Image (tube, coloured by chain):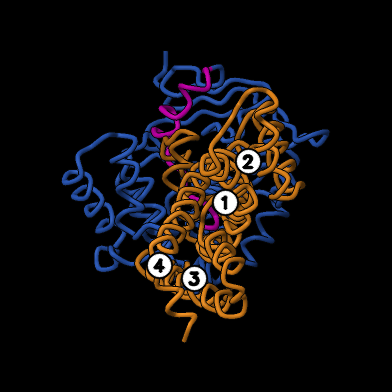
Chain colours: A orange, B blue
Amino acid sequence: MMFFSKLVTYIPSLLKGLGITLELTLLSAIIGFFAAIFLVVGVLYGNRFFKILCNFIITIIRGTPMMVQLFLIYFGLPGINIKLSPLTAAVIAFIINSSAYQAEYLKGGFMAISKEQIEAAYSIGLNKWDAIRLIVFPQAFRFAIPALSNEIVYLIQYTSVAYTIGLPELFYISKNFASKTYMNLEIYLFIGIIYLIFIYIITKLTDIVEKKLYIPGFDTSHLK
Amino acid sequence: MEENLLIIENIEKAFGSQKVLDGVSFKLNKGDVKVIVGPSGTGKSTLLRCINLLNPPDKGRIYLQNTEITQLPHSKIPSIRQKIGMVFQHFALFNHLSAIDNVALGLIKVKKMNKTDAYEKAMFELKRVGLDQHKDKYPAQLSGGQKQRVGIARALAMDPLLILFDEPTSALDPELIGEVLQVMQNLAKEGMTMICVTHEMGFAKSVANEVIFMEKGKIVEQGPPLKLFTEATHPRTREFLSKISELYGESEKK
């Protein structure tokens, strides 16, 4: 059980790494969600300028690899004298990346709301933005919960890519451990289990959120 | 000047190259119930949607209480719409809100009423359509007839000057039509001003003071229901009304 005795000395840095992984995940998911609302509303309800702009942003982000975006921000921006820490660079890259994907998930939800409901909202005197905020969004969000929860799962896993710019997140620490101890099998199995546990917790949490927000007629459980 | 609630002057509306309304005019007084009939694709729904500016007309003018509403800036349109109720063919209830929240939403968000008063008023309107027992149900838990009655209560809650009904019963199962017509009949008797696109001739005969027959974007003939049913001057009116009476003869007896 040499592995565990070595692991014990690594526990503080592993916990730190886990903290960074979760921080990166949550910041990207939450800020990315608000950015996604902006993008999707721009695409669906904006004027010509915003429609084109938001569509352009989404196309660029979804059309290029995450790694390219991350390297561009961390290694590329210093070329124009913008130097960011690995954490800041990673947070920005993941927010941008996730916002485009979340926008696509929300778009599906927005488009599932009948035009008649929006007209009904207008007919009682609501303006366009109130109709979107009070009628369309609450329904679109419910429809999008399964896809959004999937995005969080994906983010937890994909934040490991940030090790490439030297961000000491969970995967980076494990790699460090492996290169010092040569216990590749043990540490990657161990770290895999850690990821699995957290993803399981997140999945359960989103299930609870979905149940809490449940409304008859919005049952998406059959989609899973 | 005569006090007309609503004046529609020569409105025209086209979707692309398709002319849907081709010079429609009529007047409406307070308490009037007008029923608009005609073949599908004639522009009846478009006419209603022009009136509450969901599809503003291309040409012509609409006056509500002697104020022209067809030339208003965008920002003024919602304040006009809240004075004109609309009941939709497919109910168009807000699916994420309970029956009472559907009715109260406009009161809270548009009329800025406080919640206690808004829910009291919403409850009153639900009672009026016979649905106070179902106030906490969501649209998915209601029958078609109940949904449409919530739709009517939602329109009523805003205390509109008039209500537009866009084929309110044509998406309903036959046995559910009666409960909706009953509510509409009661409203008419209480003096509500209404424009109804419907083929329910029994309803037209019992409460309408005018029936308007439209075809190809134009008013072909209009008059009191009995006159139109028995001595229509235009052959197309006669042909259409007799066909409709045959088809809807059953629900007429209700």
User: Mark 3 and 4 residues: CB-CB less than 8 Å, in contact?
Assistant: no
Three-letter code, disc 2:
Leu
Q: Amino acid at mark 3?
A: Ile
Mark 4 burial class by Cα count in 10 Å: few <14, some 14-19, many 20+: few
Q: Position of residue B178 (x, y in %)?
A: 43, 67
Chain identifier of the residue bearing label 3 in the image: A
Mark 2 or 3, closer to the camera:
3
Give how far across and how far down residue A178 sits, in percent.
59, 69
Q: Earlier in the sequence, mark 4 or mark 1?
A: 4
Q: Are marks 4 and 1 on the same chain?
A: yes
Choose the circle earlier in sequence order: 2 or 3: 2
Q: How far apart, in angstroms, are the residues tagged by discs 4 and 1?
A: 45 Å
Q: Which residues are magenta?
A: B72-90
Q: Amino acid at mark 4?
A: Ile
Q: B37 or B11: which is nearer to us?
A: B11
Is B106 left, or right, of A33 in this rendering? left
Q: Is residue B85 highlighted in magenta? A: yes
Q: Nearer the viewer, mark 3 or mark 4?
A: 4
Residue matched to label 3: A199
